[in-house]
Amino acid sequence: MKAKEIMTSDIVSVCGDTSIKEAAVKMRDADIGSLPVEENEHLVGIVTDRDIVLKTVAEDLDSSQVKCKEVMSKDVITATPDMNVEEVAHLMAHNQVKRIPVVQDEGVVGIISLKDLSHTREDEAGDVLNDITEDSSNTFS
C-alpha cells in the first residue's frame, strides 16, 4: 500500500508570518495537532501543539505576537506519495514523530498520522507508537 492511499489530503496549513494564536485557532477548528508551514507552496516547517505550549505559553510570550516561523520545527521528516506505508511507519518510528507530511515537488499534498496508519494495520501502528513513546532513560523494575 502507498502513502497516497492512506494520507489525509484535506490540508490546513499556515505561512511563517501567521501568529501562533491564529495557528492554534486553526488547529482547534480543524481538530488537528500540527500545521505545515508553507511559503510559496513549499514546505518550510511544521508547528505542533507541543511547540505552541513549550515555546510560547511556557515562556509566557504573547501568542498574538509570536510568529509560526519563530517556533516551528524546520527539519521536517517527510514522505512521498508513492512511498510504501511500511517505509512511512519506519520513518515515523525512527524519528519519533506522530505525523508526517507527504510532499511532492516541495509542496504538501497530504499528511499521514498514527491514526491513518492504524486504519491500515493495527499491529504496525502499535509498533510505531511503541517506538515513538519509548524512552530508554526510564526503566521500571
Image (spheres, grey):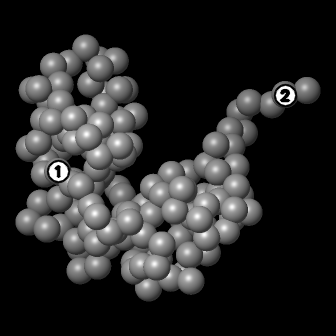
SS assignment at label 2: loop
Q: Is residue 32 left or right of residue 115?
A: left
Residue 50, position in %: x, y? 40, 34
SS assignment at label 1: loop
Disc 1: which residue: 14
Disc nearer the start of the sequence (2/1) = 1
In this orientation, does residue 95 appear?
Answer: no
Q: Callout 1, which amino acid? A: Val
Q: Residue at x 34, y 18 (%)?
A: 58
Residue 26: which disc? none
Q: Distance between the residues labelled 2 and 1?
A: 41 Å
Q: Which of 97 and 24 is in front in this view?
A: 24
Q: Is residue 71 left or right of residue 140?
A: left
Residue 14, position in %: x, y? 17, 51
Q: Which residue is drawn at 26% across and 40% down?
A: 29
Image quadrant occupied by the N terminus = bottom right
Residue 93, position in %: x, y? 60, 58
In this orientation, does residue 89 appear?
Answer: yes
Residue 140: which disc? 2
Seen in the picture, residue 74 relative to 79 is either above or below; the reply is above
Seen in the picture, residue 116 relative to 138 is either above or below; the reply is below
